[in-house]
Amino acid sequence: MTSIAELIARRAVEQNRIRALMTAQRAGERAKLKIGPEHVAWVKEEMCIGCDQCTIVCDDDAIEVYPVKMKSPIIEVDVNKKAKIVRDPCSGCGLCVLSCPTDAIVMIDR
Ligand code: SF4
Ligand code: SF4
């Protein structure tokens, strides 16, 4: 029978494998991004779920979240929100694109 120690060791190996895979994938995505001062981030509002991940990674305070009403009248929540980019402070670093779980952010020409 597998011991707890063996399970913990297996879990650590799996975690490292997944981390390495995700890092490699993100590196590939980042290489394809249009980044730099001549570019700016843009949020596709319909894809944003208001999770706040992008605001956490943005060092330039270039992302604001604003409240929106739910589209469905049968769902009631206290807060439903979307992110939007403030163009001037956005340095075009692209970090928010990589952080977004729904691929709601794209880099566009400034
Ligand atoms: S591209 Fe960089 S600076 Fe611009 S909003 Fe995203 S994280 Fe912030
Ligand atoms: S990370 Fe993506 S889904 Fe989450 S608030 Fe930002 S733009 Fe919206």
Image: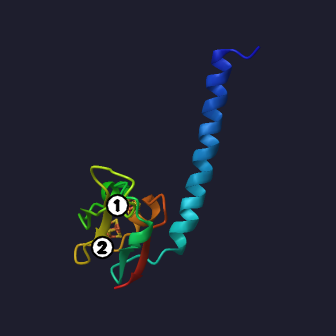
Q: From the viewer's side, name the closer residue of 53 and 32.
A: 53
> On the rendered image, what quadrant is the N terminus found in?
top right
Q: Which numbered mark, 1 or 2, is in the foreground of this view?
A: 1
Q: Which mark is residue 4?
A: none
Instruction: Check whether the beta carbons of the residues at disc 1 and disc 2 lie within 8 A of each other.
Output: no
50 sits left or right of 20 in the view = left
Label 2 secondary element:
loop
Q: From the viewer's side, name the closer residue of 70 and 1.
A: 70
Q: Position of residue 93 (x, y in %)?
A: 37, 70
Q: Position of residue 6 (x, y in %)?
A: 68, 20
Q: From the viewer's side, name the closer residue of 105 and 30.
A: 105
Name the residue located 54 percent from the left edge and 60 percent from the top edge: 26
Q: Is mark 1 within 8 Å of ligand 2?
A: no
Q: Gap in Å between the C-alphas at discs 1 and 2?
A: 31 Å
Label 1 secondary element:
loop
Q: Position of residue 27 (x, y in %)?
A: 54, 62
Position of 14 relative to 102 (above/below)? above
Position of 10 relative to 16 (above/below)? above
**Quarter of image, res 99:** bottom left
Q: Which mark is residue 91?
A: 2
Classify the position of ligand 1 by quadrant: top left, top right, bottom left or bottom right: bottom left
Residue type marked 1:
Met
87 sits left or right of 48 in the view = left
> On the rendered image, what quadrant is the C terminus found in?
bottom left
Residue type marked 2:
Ser
**Quarter of image, res 63:** bottom left
The mark that comes first in sequence, 1 or 2, is 1
Q: Which mark is residue 70?
A: 1
